[in-house]
Image (spheres, grey):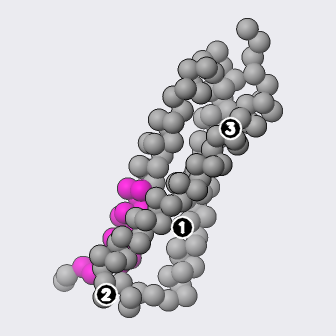
Amino acid sequence: MLGVETREAATEAVRYWEPRRILYNAVLVLVVSTYFFLGLPFSTSTLSMNLFLVLFALAVLANIAYCAAYVVDIFAQTTGLRDTWLKYRWILFAIGVFFAAVITRFVSMGLFLRTEQ
């Protein structure tokens, strides 16, 4: 059995991961929105240009972290376990979305929920 070329593996990775990036971002937006609405009316007092810039920077960082899946995916595709990997890589996606949602939850709680002192 011949190994898969890196170019073929990279092309397959893009085909798989990029459509799922939309779902990944939608989940993170849902988490942020949920905590914004749970924090009402306090959360509206946090609205500012700086908050939007922070959220933008965090969104960019979340998408950079999403790209880590490419390293794992391309490597796994170039091994003898390619067929098994292609069947089960959705597990990496699910774990990554869950992990990102947990981090997003904690950040959103800090931004939008009032802490009683």
* Camera-nearest label, 1 or 2: 2
Q: Give the quadrant of the N terminus.
A: top right
Q: CA distance from mark 1 to mark 2?
A: 21 Å
Looking at numbered disc 3 in the image, what kind of residue is underneath it?
Answer: Ala
Q: Could you tell which of marks 1 and 2 lies nearer the N-terminus?
A: 2
Question: Would you say residue 112 sits in the magenta stretch?
Answer: yes
Q: Position of residue 89 (x, y in %)?
A: 54, 32
The answer to whether 62 is drawn above or below residue 98 in the figure is below
- Number of the label disc, if any, that sits on residue 13: 3
Residue at point 35% right, 72% down?
A: 35
Magenta stretch, residue numbers: 101-115
Q: Is 97 included in the stretch rendered in magenta? A: no
Distance between the alpha carbons at the discs numbered 1 and 3: 24 Å
- Percent x, y for residue 58? 54, 67
Pointer 2: what residue?
Answer: 42
Q: Earlier in the sequence, mark 2 or mark 3?
A: 3
Classify residue 103 as left or right of residue 58: left
Magenta residues, dominant SS class: helix
Please identify the quarter of the rendering in which residue 76 is found: top right
67 left or right of 26?
A: right
